[in-house]
Amino acid sequence: MALKATWTKIENQSDIPQDNQGQTLDSDVQKGKPKASKPPKKTEFRVGDTVRVHYRLIEKEKEAGKTKRSIKEITRERIQVFEGIVISIKGREENRMFTVRRIGAAGIGIERIFPICSPWIHDITVKRRGAVRRAKLYYLRDKVGKAATRVNEATIPTTPR
């Protein structure tokens, strides 16, 4: 099953639910939190594919000022890449979540669950297509070493001319 993000576009402001004073009921808009303002590129991927998930990180760091008493808090934003095999896809429509598993240092397996419609995900790229016959690849958790990253590569059928 391929994974697609679906978005609906609001044409005018009257479609947004409002209270009797005319303020929108969406609390995230009022607080200024990041919202999924732009839909991600239509990247289709399936279970067994090797993907690279580019997601935004916000780091807060305390830094001493010119005087000893002043301490400034600096926020930095950067993009970090998490690359691994998609072992499961759960949910429906914009509530979908997908789990990516990779092998870290010292052969330790690292899994991370991402929502498909998140303002923190910058980009999702498919590095390699996988050919699997399961909807969930939880059996990869029991594999050790190189066998934990082995999934047969899918052959893309070419159309004859």
Image: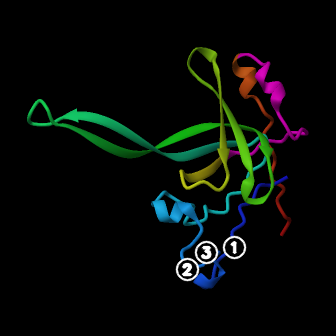
Instruction: Determine whether the residue tagged by mark 3 lies in a helix, strand or loop.
Output: loop
Taking depth in this image into account, of 26 and 94 the one nearest to the observer is: 26
Q: Is residue 128 left or right of residue 52?
A: right
Q: Amino acid at mark 2?
A: Gly
Q: Earlier in the sequence, mark 1 or mark 2?
A: 1
User: Which residue is under mark 2?
Assistant: 22
Region in magenta? 127-144
- Magenta-drawn stretch contains 133: yes
Vertical arrangement, residue 110 with respect to residue 158, above or below: above
Instruction: Determine whether the residue tagged by mark 1 lies in a helix, strand or loop.
Output: loop
Residue at the outermost left position: 67
Q: Residue at x 73, y 54 (%)?
A: 95
Q: At which x and y percent is residue 136?
A: 84, 37
Q: Is residue 105 left or right of residue 157?
A: left
User: Which residue is under mark 1?
Assistant: 8
User: Which residue is under mark 3?
Assistant: 19
Q: Residue at x 84, y 64 (%)?
A: 159
